[in-house]
Structure formats: structure tokens, C-alpha cells
Amino acid sequence: MKPGDELPALTIPITRTLIVAGALASRDYQDVHHDTEAAREKGSPDIFMNILTTNGLVGRYLTDHFAPCCVLRKVAIRLGAPNYPGDTMVLRGTVTEVSDGTAVVRIVGANGLGHHVTGTATVSLPEDATTMSLPEGTATVSLPEGTK
């Protein structure tokens, strides 16, 4: 692994179930994350994903590639375009730095409106990880049957 290496993309369908479940799991009971009418009254066209769900998805993206031995040391993200139901977010990462058993990865998650999330993460790696090569291809999230 070296600076410039790109992680395979992760494609995530944005569903109502994902948005509401993420808000509930993170104890974010703001109505804009589960009540369409309330979200519209506040100027949004629909419910939208909260930052804690996005943060969890970014963490999952990183640990899917560097786990099981990696440790997320720092995740610094900023939200941009909202994730609304029916859209798709694609997470991409680029290694920007590798030193002393850690890697810094630049993260970008884009949807149909633009960049939903941007930021960086610092990941502690096992001793042999600096020589590992990243897998090719694109990963896709599969939701349980019956979820929309």
C-alpha cells in the first residue's frame, strides 16, 4: 500500500429503511430523519440521512478494506448534499499517506446531487498491511430481502 492507491468503490442504495434505522440506532429522533411531512414543513423535499449514519457507513467502508486488524484512529467528515430515499451513494477512498503503521485515507461519498460526505480517516494497520495490495472491483451493499 502506498499514497495514491485507491480503495474499491462501495455503492449504497439510500432507502427509507436505511435512513430511519440509522437515525433510530444512533438515537437521533429529529423528525426530519423519519417524518416526511415534518421534513417538508422544514423545507426539505423528503426525510434525509443523519451524520451519524453517514459516519457509520464511512467506518464500515474502511474496515471492510483494512479489517479485521485495523483500528479507526480518527474520522473527520463533513456533510454536503443530503442523502434522500431513492438515491444511491458511492463511497470512494484514496490513500494519501502511509507511515508508522498508519494510513490516512481521503474519503468522498457522492450521490445524485453531488458530494454527500468528504473527509479523511486515519487507520492503524497490522505490521504486514503496508505491503498488502487492495482488492480490485466495486463492492455493493445488499439489503435484506423485502427492504426498499
Image (spheres, helix red, strand yellow):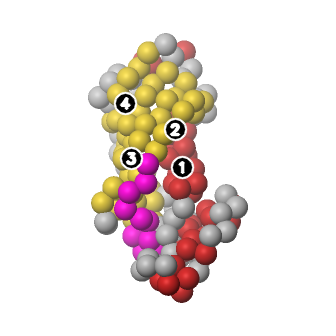
State if disc 2 and disc 1 touch (CB < 8 Å): yes
State if disc 2 and disc 4 touch (CB < 8 Å): no
Q: Residue 9: x and y, percent? A: 37, 48
> Which quadrant: the N terminus?
top left
Query: Which picture quadrant has residue 126?
Result: top right
Q: Residue 23: x and y, percent? A: 62, 64
Element assignment for label 2: strand
Q: CA distance from mark 3 to mark 1?
A: 11 Å
Residue, disc 1: 55
Residue bounds of the magenta highlight:
78-87
Label number found at residue 118:
3
Query: Which picture quadrant has residue 25?
Result: bottom right
Sequence-wise, which precedes: disc 1 or disc 2?
1
Does residue 11 appear in the picture of this structure?
A: no
Q: Is residue 106 above or below residue 147?
A: above
Foreground disc of the pair 4, 1: 1
Between residue 4 and residue 75, name the one nearer to us.
75
Q: Residues within 10 Å of mark 1 (few under 14, many from 20)?
A: some
Q: CA distance from mark 4 to mark 2?
A: 14 Å
Q: Residue 47: x and y, percent? A: 51, 75
Residue, disc 2: 75
Q: Amino acid at mark 1?
A: Asn
Q: CA distance from mark 4 to mark 1?
A: 18 Å
State if disc 3 and disc 2 touch (CB < 8 Å): no
Sequence-wise, which precedes: disc 2 or disc 3?
2
Q: Is residue 98 above or below residue 111?
A: above
Between residue 13 and residue 133, name the one nearer to us.
13
Residue drawn at x 35%, y 28% as measured from the top left: 96
Q: Residues within 10 Å of mark 3 (few under 14, many from 20)?
A: some
Label number found at residue 95:
4
Sequence-wise, which precedes: disc 4 or disc 3?
4
Sequence-wise, which precedes: disc 3 or disc 1?
1
